[in-house]
Amino acid sequence: MTITNPAQYTAVTTSDKIFQALQADIVEGRIAPGSKISEPELSKKYHISRSTLREALNRLERCHLIERKANVGCRVVECTVAGLLEIYQVREALEGMACRLAAQNMSDSEIADLQKVLSLHADTKQLKQGVAYYQEEGDLDFHYRVILGSHNQQLITILCSELYHLVRMYRFQFGMNSPRATRAFDEHHHILTAIADRDGELAELLMRRHIAASRKNIEKKLQKET
């Protein structure tokens, strides 16, 4: 089965390029959450037509990075605690399912590649210091690779296209440092072992526990800050 890799998508058209540029600016906070999207300003900035810009904005809306409101127009979504926790609830269920399917469907070479990804993670300075475990997007993201390994196009579309960059946006906004860094990395190893053993039931259980633990950690962190 051929898997499309959205995070590695190569810009082809002008709309593609504008979409990717705006997506990066929103995710990384250069365009602030809640800020209004001005079509005339963006058209002038990028020297593009309004129709080309609107095509890019439509794609950003499908990725849940912007929203349209009557009499207001387009705005970048707000990052709220409630929204963050809802995303984790969705991820727990759907990534658990993806992990079960990955144990059934990943090839031996895909599993070997995933092991190489974890080996790269182990060498990062922040993880060695136990302060953060933040992965680059796409093929260097453990969760992303597991989802692709499910070989289920519906899950891939939902998790790797529609929600993927929104999750990254929340990571940037709420901070990436975590006291769970080392433990999260160890949990990834246990998940990979279950996948390699073709134990779908255990793989799903471990992934659900892993994401639930991250959600609880975030809840505790936010409670301390309030």
Image (cartoon, rainbow, N blue to C red):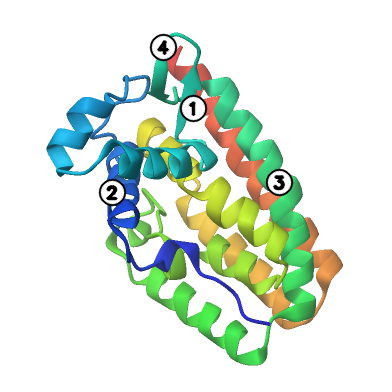
Label 2 Cα crowd, 10 Å radius (few <14 / some 14-19 / many 20+): many
Label 1 Cα crowd, 10 Å radius (few <14 / some 14-19 / many 20+): some
Circle 3: residue type: Glu
Circle 2: residue type: Ile
**Regarding mark 3 in the picture, which secondary structure is present there?**
helix
Q: Earlier in the sequence, mark 2 or mark 1?
A: 2
Q: Which residue is mark 2?
A: 18
Q: Earlier in the sequence, mark 2 or mark 4?
A: 2
Above or below: residue 16 compared with residue 179: below
In three-dimensional space, the C-alpha distance between marks 2 and 1, rounded to whole angstroms, equals 35 Å
In three-dimensional space, the C-alpha distance between marks 4 and 3, rounded to whole angstroms, equals 34 Å
Circle 4: residue type: Val
Confirm whether residue 176 shows in the render: no
Quadrant that contains the N terminus = bottom right
Q: Which residue is mark 1?
A: 221
In three-dimensional space, the C-alpha distance between marks 4 and 1, rounded to whole angstroms, equals 34 Å
Please say if the residues under marks 2 and 1 sit with CB atoms less than 8 Å apart. no
Label 4 Cα crowd, 10 Å radius (few <14 / some 14-19 / many 20+): few
Circle 1: residue type: Lys
Q: Earlier in the sequence, mark 1 or mark 3?
A: 3
Q: Position of residue 5 (x, y in %)?
A: 50, 69
In three-dimensional space, the C-alpha distance between marks 1 and 3, rounded to whole angstroms, equals 19 Å
Q: Earlier in the sequence, mark 4 or mark 1?
A: 4
In three-dimensional space, the C-alpha distance between marks 2 and 4, rounded to whole angstroms, equals 22 Å
Front one among 203 and 102: 102
Label 3 Cα crowd, 10 Å radius (few <14 / some 14-19 / many 20+): many
**Regarding mark 2 in the picture, which secondary structure is present there?**
helix
> Along the horizontal axis of the image, is 80 left or right of 135?
right
Front one among 73 and 205: 73
Q: Nearer the viewer, mark 2 or mark 1?
A: 2
